[in-house]
Image (cartoon, grey):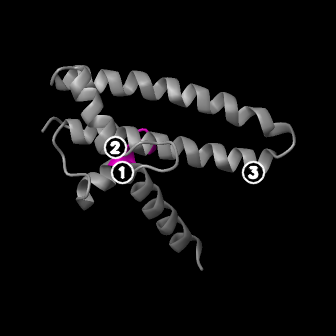
Amino acid sequence: MNPEACWTLFLDWLLAQAVAGAGGLPAAEQVAAEALREATGDRAQAIETIIWWRTGHAAGLGMLAALPMGLLSIVGISTSLAATYLLGANTAAAIAIVQGYDVNSAAVRSLILLTLLGGERLPDA
Protein backbone atom coordinates (compact mmCIF):
# COMPACT_ATOMS: atom_id res chain seq x y z
CA MET A 1 0.00 0.00 0.00
CA ASN A 2 1.38 3.39 -0.95
CA PRO A 3 1.85 6.17 1.63
CA GLU A 4 -0.98 8.28 0.19
CA ALA A 5 -3.46 5.43 0.62
CA CYS A 6 -2.25 4.91 4.20
CA TRP A 7 -2.82 8.58 5.04
CA THR A 8 -6.26 8.49 3.43
CA LEU A 9 -7.21 5.45 5.50
CA PHE A 10 -5.87 7.10 8.66
CA LEU A 11 -7.78 10.33 8.02
CA ASP A 12 -10.99 8.45 7.23
CA TRP A 13 -10.60 6.46 10.47
CA LEU A 14 -9.78 9.61 12.43
CA LEU A 15 -12.88 11.45 11.20
CA ALA A 16 -15.15 8.48 11.81
CA GLN A 17 -13.87 8.06 15.37
CA ALA A 18 -13.92 11.80 16.09
CA VAL A 19 -17.54 12.17 15.01
CA ALA A 20 -18.85 8.88 16.46
CA GLY A 21 -16.67 8.80 19.58
CA ALA A 22 -13.96 6.30 20.44
CA GLY A 23 -13.05 4.64 23.69
CA GLY A 24 -13.60 7.22 26.41
CA LEU A 25 -14.11 10.04 23.90
CA PRO A 26 -17.81 10.94 23.56
CA ALA A 27 -19.41 11.48 20.16
CA ALA A 28 -19.17 15.01 18.79
CA GLU A 29 -22.97 15.25 18.80
CA GLN A 30 -23.01 14.46 22.53
CA VAL A 31 -20.29 17.02 23.26
CA ALA A 32 -22.21 19.69 21.32
CA ALA A 33 -25.54 18.84 22.98
CA GLU A 34 -24.05 18.96 26.49
CA ALA A 35 -22.30 22.26 25.81
CA LEU A 36 -25.48 23.81 24.40
CA ARG A 37 -27.46 22.58 27.40
CA GLU A 38 -24.92 24.07 29.84
CA ALA A 39 -24.93 27.34 27.90
CA THR A 40 -28.75 27.36 27.77
CA GLY A 41 -28.67 27.53 23.97
CA ASP A 42 -26.07 30.30 23.63
CA ARG A 43 -23.87 29.08 20.77
CA ALA A 44 -20.90 31.31 21.57
CA GLN A 45 -20.89 30.23 25.20
CA ALA A 46 -21.25 26.57 24.16
CA ILE A 47 -18.19 26.89 21.92
CA GLU A 48 -16.21 28.49 24.75
CA THR A 49 -17.25 25.60 27.01
CA ILE A 50 -16.15 23.01 24.44
CA ILE A 51 -12.79 24.70 23.96
CA TRP A 52 -12.23 25.09 27.71
CA TRP A 53 -12.97 21.42 28.50
CA ARG A 54 -11.06 20.09 25.49
CA THR A 55 -8.02 22.17 26.34
CA GLY A 56 -8.02 20.54 29.77
CA HIS A 57 -8.37 17.11 28.20
CA ALA A 58 -5.46 17.82 25.86
CA ALA A 59 -3.24 18.92 28.75
CA GLY A 60 -4.05 15.77 30.69
CA LEU A 61 -3.45 13.65 27.61
CA GLY A 62 -0.06 15.26 27.13
CA MET A 63 0.91 14.50 30.70
CA LEU A 64 -0.14 10.85 30.38
CA ALA A 65 1.61 10.42 27.06
CA ALA A 66 4.85 11.85 28.46
CA LEU A 67 5.12 9.19 31.17
CA PRO A 68 6.28 6.23 29.05
CA MET A 69 8.45 8.28 26.70
CA GLY A 70 11.74 7.01 28.09
CA LEU A 71 10.94 3.36 27.43
CA LEU A 72 8.70 3.45 24.39
CA SER A 73 9.41 6.76 22.74
CA ILE A 74 8.41 5.75 19.19
CA VAL A 75 5.16 4.13 20.34
CA GLY A 76 4.50 6.93 22.83
CA ILE A 77 4.97 9.67 20.25
CA SER A 78 2.78 7.89 17.68
CA THR A 79 0.04 7.26 20.21
CA SER A 80 0.23 10.81 21.52
CA LEU A 81 -0.07 12.29 18.02
CA ALA A 82 -3.01 10.07 17.09
CA ALA A 83 -4.79 10.89 20.36
CA THR A 84 -4.13 14.61 19.92
CA TYR A 85 -5.49 14.59 16.38
CA LEU A 86 -8.50 12.55 17.50
CA LEU A 87 -9.28 15.01 20.30
CA GLY A 88 -8.77 17.98 17.97
CA ALA A 89 -11.04 16.53 15.29
CA ASN A 90 -13.69 15.70 17.91
CA THR A 91 -13.52 19.28 19.20
CA ALA A 92 -13.78 20.77 15.70
CA ALA A 93 -16.69 18.45 14.87
CA ALA A 94 -18.54 19.42 18.06
CA ILE A 95 -18.05 23.12 17.30
CA ALA A 96 -19.28 22.57 13.74
CA ILE A 97 -22.41 20.87 15.12
CA VAL A 98 -23.02 23.77 17.52
CA GLN A 99 -22.78 26.13 14.54
CA GLY A 100 -25.36 24.07 12.64
CA TYR A 101 -23.10 22.33 10.13
CA ASP A 102 -23.61 18.76 8.93
CA VAL A 103 -20.45 16.88 9.97
CA ASN A 104 -21.27 14.14 7.47
CA SER A 105 -20.81 16.43 4.47
CA ALA A 106 -17.52 16.22 2.60
CA ALA A 107 -16.94 19.98 2.83
CA VAL A 108 -17.30 20.10 6.62
CA ARG A 109 -15.14 16.99 7.04
CA SER A 110 -12.44 18.70 4.96
CA LEU A 111 -12.69 21.79 7.17
CA ILE A 112 -12.40 19.63 10.30
CA LEU A 113 -9.19 18.13 8.91
CA LEU A 114 -7.89 21.59 8.04
CA THR A 115 -8.34 22.68 11.65
CA LEU A 116 -5.83 20.00 12.61
CA LEU A 117 -3.30 21.81 10.45
CA GLY A 118 -3.92 25.06 12.29
CA GLY A 119 -6.60 26.53 10.02
CA GLU A 120 -8.91 29.29 11.17
CA ARG A 121 -12.33 28.68 12.71
CA LEU A 122 -15.34 27.69 10.64
CA PRO A 123 -17.36 30.60 9.27
CA ASP A 124 -20.64 31.34 11.03
CA ALA A 125 -23.66 29.44 9.67
Where the N terminus falls, by quadrant? bottom right
Q: Earlier in the sequence, mark 1 or mark 3?
A: 1
Q: Give the residue at the far bottom of this rendering.
A: 1
Residue with the mark numbered 1: 19
**Circle 3: residue type:** Val
Q: Earlier in the sequence, mark 1 or mark 2?
A: 1
Nearer to us in this view, 12 or 113? 12
* Relative to 46, residue 93 above or below: below
Q: Residue at x 25, y 41 (%)?
A: 96
Where the C terminus falls, by quadrant? top left
Cβ atoms at labels 1 and 2 below 8 Å apart: yes
What mark, if any, has residue 75 been given in the picture? 3
Residue with the mark numbered 2: 28
Q: Residue at x 21, y 22 (%)?
A: 44
Please give the range of residues in magenta: 112-118
Badge 3: how crowded within 10 Å, few (<14), some, or many (20+)? few
Between disc 1 and disc 3, the foreground one is 1
Q: Is residue 90 left or right of residue 101?
A: right
Q: Residue 51 at what x, y percent from top left?
A: 38, 26
**Magenta part mainly helix, strand or loop?**
helix
**Circle 2: residue type:** Ala
